[in-house]
């Protein structure tokens, strides 16, 4: 299946290195979790005055389709939410120094738990009644020590494969996916269910993840694999 997000030359390089274009094509949906990264109003709604990722809006139908299929196949869904907490200006002082006073103020206004920007976009098919989990994370990677409870949650679910969706591809998706691979999860990135601020940033992140850290597939291919598993 052709994927406009992955150039043929990169696929050829992956085949040359690993012997196949899709190293995790045979994943078991029952032992798979869909990880939806930071699909919050702060990143999707320009009115939040933070860092809107317009391309992420186009991923919502793909994310919802994957969530429905994974649940039906016996897998699980985790929705990650990036947060600002007052103590982070000290515990993550490097980030806030980079942002400066105004950027720090805007981040707090967008991502504090009591602000609307922290909430998931209402168009997402979050189903707490079907076992979906909400996971708050304090760093770009949900697996950074102290960032979140994601690792414990996944251990309880007994999953070995993670399908990554959400935004942004080159920041929180990539950071969490890289760490996931090094924690021995099988990583699949949904190429049309992830998004970055620019097409160039999206493609560059996908290239690094596909070549070094796991697999990359469009939503239609993932759905086909779930259907035949």
Image (tube, rainbow, N blue to C red):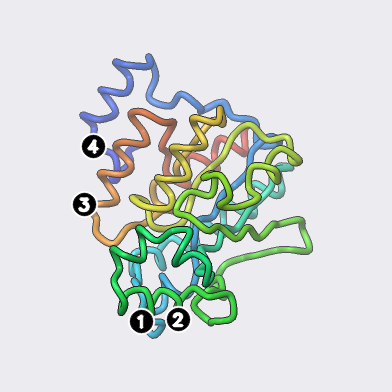
Lateral position of residue 134 relative to residue 123, left or right: right
Circle 4 SS class: loop
Residues 215 and 7: in front is: 215
**Residue 13: image x %, image y %?**
26, 22
Q: Position of residue 176 (x, y in %)?
A: 47, 45
Q: Earlier in the sequence, mark 4 or mark 2?
A: 4
Residue underneath mark 1: 49
Q: Nearer the viewer, mark 1 or mark 2?
A: 2
Q: Identify the image quadrant of the C terminus.
A: top right
> How dense is the environment of label 1, judged by Cα within 10 Å: few (below 14), some, or many (20 and up)?
some
User: Can you identify the residue that label 3 sits on?
Assistant: 200
Q: Earlier in the sequence, mark 1 or mark 2?
A: 1
Could you tell which of marks 4 and 3 lies nearer the N-terminus?
4
Which residue is identified by label 4?
A: 7
Q: How much space separates mark 4 and mark 3, taking CA atoms?
A: 12 Å
Residue that badge 2 annotates: 109
Q: Quadrant of the N terminus?
A: top left
The residue drawn where x is 32% and y is 16% is: 17
Q: Are marks 1 and 4 in contact (CB under 8 Å)?
A: no
Mark 1 and mark 3: Cα distance apart in space: 23 Å
């Amino acid at each position: 299946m052709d994927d406009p997000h992955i150039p043929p030359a990169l696929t050829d390089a992956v085949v040359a290195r690993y012997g196949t274009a899709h190293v995790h094509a045979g994943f078991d949906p029952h032992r798979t979790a869909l990880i939806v990264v930071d699909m919050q109003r702060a990143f999707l709604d320009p009115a939040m005055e933070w860092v809107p990722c317009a391309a992420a809006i186009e991923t919502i139908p793909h994310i919802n389709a994957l969530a429905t299929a994974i649940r039906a196949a016996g897998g699980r869904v985790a929705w990650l939410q990036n947060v600002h907490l007052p103590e982070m200006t000290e515990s993550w002082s490097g980030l806030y120094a980079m942002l400066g006073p105004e950027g720090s103020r805007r981040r707090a206004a967008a991502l504090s738990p009591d602000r609307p920007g922290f909430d998931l976009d209402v168009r997402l098919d979050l189903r707490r009644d079907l076992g979906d989990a909400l996971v708050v994370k304090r760093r770009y990677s949900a697996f950074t020590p102290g960032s979140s409870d994601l690792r414990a949650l996944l251990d309880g679910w007994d999953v070995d494969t993670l399908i990554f969706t959400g935004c942004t591809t080159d920041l929180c998706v990539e950071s969490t996916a890289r760490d996931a691979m090094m924690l021995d999860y099988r990583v699949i990135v949904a190429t049309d269910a992830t998004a970055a601020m620019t097409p160039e940033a999206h493609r560059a992140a996908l290239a690094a993840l596909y070549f070094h850290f796991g697999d990359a597939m469009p939503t239609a291919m993932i759905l086909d694999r779930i259907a035949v598993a």
